[in-house]
Image: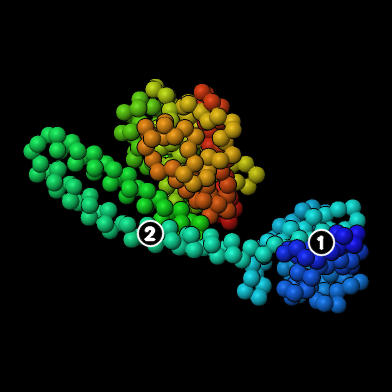
Amino acid sequence: MSILSDFLREVDEGYAVINTSGIVVYANDFMIKRHIIKENWEGKLYYECFNLLAFVSAIAECIAEKKRIKIFVEHDQMEYSVDLFSAKDGILLRITDITQFKRYERSKKEFLANVSHELKTPIAIIRSILETLIEEEQDEKKKSMLERALRRSEDMKNLVEDLLIITKLESGEEKLRKENLSLWDVVELVFDNIKEVAQNKKVQLINRVDENFKIYADQEKLALLLLNLVDNAVKYNKTNGQVVVSAYTQDAHAVIEVSDTGIGIPKEHLPFVFERFYRVDRSRSKEVGGTGLGLSIVKHIALSHGGKVEVESKEGEGSKFRVYLPVNYSTL
């Protein structure tokens, strides 16, 4: 035990052990130096030793519920990740300093937001110049090259816009204007925006949402979420395939389901499809286009509404995406 104590005394993490009676039986130097626990902690009850209410509440919950708990705490201008593990003889509390990581994450998001914002104007100017040149150009070969450049500038514009959206969603800066909406109407609006692409792919769009089905959400964000899901379902579908949108209520959530008859997603890729820029098949993605941010935007819009998103897919047989959003019972 002395070897373990010596080791824990030197590590750059905080550790504490509380027995089933709520008495602190161990705390390493990290806890004391960071003023998380009082120096005279030995033999005292946890609520007499810890300097933050967040720790006291989390310990009480862990003892009562006998389950693992994770919280994030700010203290003395530092940020910590706190894990509590329940065991037969008590609980183990582990604290990790994540201040530098959080600062890096914030600086990365600020960088992306600033760069994306600064790129919007020059891209708009380039597109305007290209459009003017295309109108005036008589040589078909040169005109074709200019049109190709215009398409690439359109891709750049879409990427910048998607980066701005996802940065705002991740930072929590994007304020939601939630209201009770007719989901059928929102789906029809999305279908209207994408029907030309679907017709070119010979993919049928089917709205199976009940016309009386209501959903509590920000209309603009919900439409963007559905547009990304339906757009993907069309792009990765088969000729003469279908995209079906349906909805139902389950466990205090409104569930939106977007299913397709497309190429499907291999099982090993499913855990990663909602990550930024993740591509299942890079060659195929290059062919159909897109920024690689669509499903990540879907995930963050769902999270910003207090919901979640999941996918079920089988290679060669299509995919089914489900979005769970909390029901607004106050208006039912």
Q: Residue at x 58, y 53 (%)?
A: 306
Q: Residue 254: x, y in percent?
A: 56, 44
Point out residue 303 in the picture as x, y percentages from the top left corner: 55, 52
Q: Quadrant of the N terminus?
A: bottom right
Question: Residue 236: x percent and y percent?
Answer: 43, 30
**Pair 1/2: label in front:** 1
- Crowding near the residue tagged with mark 1, few <14, some 14–19, many ≥20 C-alpha atoms within 10 Å: few
Seen from the viewer's position, the closer of residues 133 and 249 is 133
Q: Residue at x 81, y 61 (%)?
A: 7
Q: Of residues 140 and 311, which is closer to you in this image?
A: 140
Q: How many numbered marks have been drawn onto this rendered protein structure?
A: 2
Q: Quadrant of residue 134?
A: top left
Residue beneath disc 1: 7
x and y percentages locating residue 141 in the rendered image? 14, 34
- The type of residue carrying mark 1 is Phe
Question: In front here: 127 or 172?
Answer: 127
Q: In this picture, is 242 found above or below 159?
A: above
Amino acid identity at mark 2: Val
Up the image or down, 287 lies above or below 327; here it is: above
SS class of the residue under badge 2? Answer: helix
Instruction: Kindly identify the residue that appears in the image at 80 percent across and 66 percent down.
Output: 9
